[in-house]
Amino acid sequence: MRRDVDDRDLSICVITRGSENPTITSPLTLFGVMPIENTAGYMIPVLSSNDLSDPFGQLGLDLSDSDLRETAYEIFVGACRSSGGGRPLTYVSQSSGRSSDRASSLPSLQRSLTLTAASKVKKALGMKSKKKNNGSESATENRPATVGELMRVQMRISEQVDSRVRRALLRIAAGQLGRRIESIVLPVELLQQFKSSDFPTQREYEVWQRRNLRVLEAGLLLHPKLPLDRKDPSAQQLRQIIRGAYARPMETGKHSEAVQTLRTVTMQLACRASDDFAPDTCHWADGAPLNLRLYQILLEALFDVEEPTSMIEEVDEVLDLIKKTWGILGIDQRFHNLCFSWVLFNHYVSTGQVENDFLFAADNLLLEVKKDAKSTLDSGYSKILCSTLNSMLEWAERGLLAYHESFYRGNIDLMQSILSLVLSAATILAEENPSESGRRKVIDVADAKVDVYIRSSMRKAFSQASFDLFAFISFPFESKCREKVRISRKSAKSQLNHLPALCLLAQDVTDLAFTEKEIYSPILQRWHPLAVGVAVATLHSCFGQEVQKFVSGINELTPAVIQVLIAADKLEKDLVQMAVEDSVNSDDGGKSIIQEMTPYEAEAVIVDLVKSWIKTRVDRLKEWVDRTLQQEVWNPRANREGFAPSAVEVLRTIDETMEAFFLLPIPMHPDLLPGLMSGLDRCLQDYILKAKSGSGGSKLNGVFKKKDRSHISQRRTPMQSTTERNDSYSITQLCVRVNSFHYIRKDLEVLEKRTIAHLKSIGIREGSIVNGSRKNFERSLVACVEGIQQVCEATAYKLVFHELSHVLWDGLYVGGVSSSRIEPFLQELEQNLEVIAETVQDNTIRTRLITNIMRASFEGFLLVLLAGGPCRSFTLEDWSIIQEDFQFLMDLFWSNGDGLPIDLIGKHSTIVKGVLPLFSSDTGSLVEKFKSLMIDGNGSSTKSRLALPPTTDQWGPIEPNTILRVLCHRDDKAATTFLKKNYNLPKKL
C-alpha cells in the first residue's frame, strides 16, 4: 500500500541476499518502472519509454533516425528557401564568412536570434517560460546566431551535411528559377547535383545515395498519397531502378542518364492527380506514415538538444518555419495539432517524465484535437487519431490502473495531469467511435474510466498489501525493513507479531482506505463523484473474499478466529461509513455503492460459532452428568463438607465454562449469555433431578408420592421391612444428596455475583444484569429447593417407615401396651438423628430434615394407634401410657432445648395431641359422638345401620373415620357390639 514519501523506500522493498550488506532495490525497477529524482528530491516512479508504442506505424524500410533527420532537414531548408520569394541563392564557401554569408543567402533563416518576450506558443499551450542562466560568456558565444543555425544544431546536422544541402539547393534554384519546392521531387534533384567525387569517401557517397533511394521507395511505392496499383509500369520500373542501385550504386550527377530516367519515372508517380490535390504539386513525401514521421522529427527540434527537458525559447520562430513544410508533407492544422500533441507527450515520456509542462501542453492541445475531430470526416485522419490516442492511453493506463504504485503525496499533481489527458483522449475516442461506446453517453466515459482505474488500483494495492504481509510473516528476517515501517505506524508495537494475519491485513486495508480518501480521492472526484465509495467497495469485496475463505476453513472457535472476525466487522463498518459519507450528495444517496458491498456478516458468524461452542460445551456436560451419576456413591466421607464430589465437579465445570465464555474476545456477551446459562441451567437441573430420583433408577420415586394410610397399613409386614433394609440408598446417602443440593444453590449465588461482575466490566447496567442472570438459572434454583424438600421428606419417611419399621410398626404396642412401649424406637431414632446431625452441615437444612423426621415420627405413631391392625388393642387404662410415650417422643426432638424449638414441636404435634384424648374417652361417649357426626354429615337416616365414614386426608378428634378407628382398636364388649351391629365386623379385626 502507498505511504508517504519519507517511508516509501522501506514500505515495499526487495532484499538482495548473499551479501553481508544486503541492498534494497525498489520494486519499481523489477516491473519495468524506472525511478528518477526530480528537483524536489522525490523519487518519482516512471514507466519505461520502451513501453510507448509508435502510433504512426512502421515504414517497412531500413531508414534510421539519422536518415530521417537528414531528409527532414533537407525538406525544411528547401521549404524555407522556397518561401523566400525566389531571390537568387548563392553558394558561399565554408572558408569565408561562413555564418553571416550563409544566413544572408536564405532569407527565411537569416533572422538573428534575440531574447524576445514570452512565447505565444508556450502561452497558448499553458507552458511556463523558463529563465535560463545567461551569466556565462561562453554560453553567449556558443549560442547560434540565426534561426537556420539553431535548427541545424537542434536537428544534429553536421556543418558538412548542412553545407552540401545548401549548395545543392542553390544549384537546384539556379536551374529551376520560379519553381516551387512542392513541384519537384527533392531526392531526385539532390541525386542530380552530386556525384561520388563530391564526397570524402565512396562509402559516404553510397550511404547518401541509398538513403535518397529508400526515401523515394517509401514515399512513392510503400506509402504513396494515392493508392498505387502494383501493376503500374512506372512503379515496376522504379522498383527495378532502386533494386539495381542497391546492388550496384548508380551514377549520379548533372549529366547522368540514370538520374534522368529516375526523374521521369518518379515524376509520373508523384504527379498523379486527385480532385483534392493542389495543382503543380509532387506527392512524394505526403503519404502516411512517412510524412508524419518526418514532421515528428521536425517538431522534436523544438526541444533543446542540450537540455531535453526544456523547449527552446525561439519556439515561435522555429515553429513558423516548420509549418512551411506542410505543402511538401501534406500536413494541415488538424495533423499539426495531433502530431504536436503526440510529440509533446512522447517527449515527456522519453525524457523521464520529469517536466510536467509537456504533459500539460499535450493535454491542452487535445482540446484543439477534439474540435478538429468533430469537424472532419477524413477516414485517414480518423485512423491516425485513434492510433495516437490509443497509444497515449495504453501507456498512461499502465500507471492509472495501479496508481498506488505510481503516485503518492509527493507527485499527486502529476496524476491529475495524466488523468486529465487520458480522459480527454478517451472522450475523443468515444466520440470518434460511437459504436464501441454503445448507447452510453460520451459524458459517462470519464466516469466509467475512472471507475475502472479505481477498482483496478484498489485490487492491485490490496494484492500488494497481502503479498507484503505474507512476506512479512513467512520471511521476517528478509522483511525487516517492512517491519520497521509497520511498527512505526502501529501504537501497539509489542503486540504486532501476536495478531493473526488477517487482522494485520484488515489494519492495512483500513490504512489503505484512509490513504485513498486523503490523497487520491480529491483528484478522482473531479470526474467521479463517488470515488471514495467505489474505492472502499472494491476493498470491501477484496477483503470479503479472504473472509469467505477464512470462514470456510474454520473448524473450531479459537481466540484467533474471533479476532479475525471482529477485525473484519470493524473494517466493514469503517468502509461502509466512508461510503455513506461520500454518497450523501449523490443522486441515489449511495444505494448503488452500499448494495455492492455484500455484508461479511461477521457478527452472525461469530454468533453461530459461539452458539456451536456453547452447544458443544453443554452437550459435553450433559454426557458427563449421565456418566458420573452412574458412578456416584454419595459417600458422606468423600469430603469434609459432606456433599458429593460430582456436585463439586459439575459446578467447577460450569464455572470454567462461564469463565471461558467471558474470555472470548467478542462484543456480544450480553446477547449470547442467556443461551449459555440456559444450557448450563438445563444440565444442572438434569443433574439435580437425576440425583434426587436415584440417577434415573426410580428407586426413590415411590417415596415422593403420598400413600394412602390404609394402603400403608396393608403392605407393612416384617419381611418387607427386612427386605427394604437392604436398600443401597441409605439415610446418610440421602443426607449427602441434601448437602449437595444446598451446596449447588449456594454456589449458584456466587456464580451469579461473578457473572454480574463480568457484565459490569463490559458496561452492562446492574438492573438488567441481576434480573437476567436470576431468570436464566431459575430451573436449577427451583430444582434445588424442591430437591431439598423432597429428599428431606424421603429421608424422614425412609427412616421412620423403613429403617425403624422393626421397632415402630413391627414392635410398638404389639401384644400389649405395657409390654412393648416406645423406648426401643426412641433409642434407634436418637442414634440416627445423631448421624444425621453429623452428616448435614447446614443448620437450616439440618433443622428442616429433623423436622420432617419428627413429622414422620408423629404420623407413624398415629398409624400405630389408628391403623395398627389386629395385633394391637387398647383399653382405657392404656391412655396414660400412650400419652407418656408420645411425650417421650416429643422430648427426644426437644432434647432439653438443644433440639427443635418448642413451638415448632407444638405445631406439628397438634394432630396427635387432638387424637390422643379419644383413647381416654369411654366407649359409649365415643359411639354417641360418632353417631352424631355421621348424622350431621349424612342427614337423618331411617336405616338401622350407619354408613361407613369416608376416608379423609387428615385425622382429628371430630373426624368420623378417626373415631371409628379408635373404636376398632378398643378392647371392650361395647365397642365390639357396636361394630358388629352396624358394620358386621368380627370380634377380632
Image (cartoon, rainbow, N blue to C red):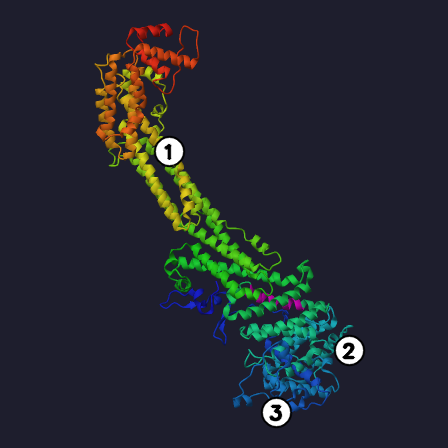
Q: Amino acid at mark 1?
A: Ala
Q: Position of residue 741 (x, y in %)?
A: 32, 34
Q: Residues within 10 Å of mark 1 (few under 14, many from 20)?
A: many
Q: Is residue 626 left or right of residue 251?
A: left
List x then y, in percent, for residue 180: 73, 83
The residue identified by callout 3 is 98
Q: Which residue is mark 1?
A: 783
User: What element does badge 3 sit on?
Assistant: helix
Could you tell me how many numbered marks the image carries?
A: 3
Q: Secondary structure at mark 2?
A: loop
Residue nearest the viewer, comparing 226 with 85: 85
Cα distance between the residues tagged 2 and 1: 117 Å
Question: Is residue 822 a member of the stretch shown in magenta?
Answer: no
Horizontal relation, residue 460 to residue 713: left or right? right
How far apart are the two marked residues, 2 and 3, measured between alpha carbons? 37 Å
Instruction: Give, as a single range, the part of the protein colored magenta.
Output: 384-400
Residue drawn at 37 percent across, 68 percent down: 21
Q: Nearer the viewer, residue 519 or 165?
A: 519
Could you tell which of marks 3 and 1 lies nearer the N-terminus? 3
| Mark 2 vs 3, N-terminal side | 3
Q: What secondary structure characterizes most of the magenta part?
A: helix
**How far from the left and from the top, in percent, is residue 493?**
38, 61
The numbered disc on residue 279 is 2
Marks 3/1: CA–CA distance: 122 Å
809 sits to left or right of 185: left
Q: State yes or no: residue 387 in magenta.
A: yes
The answer to whether 818 is drawn above or below residue 668 in the figure is above
Q: In the image, what residue type sits under mark 3?
A: Arg
Q: In front: 40, or 946?
A: 946
670 or 707: which is nearer to us?
Answer: 707
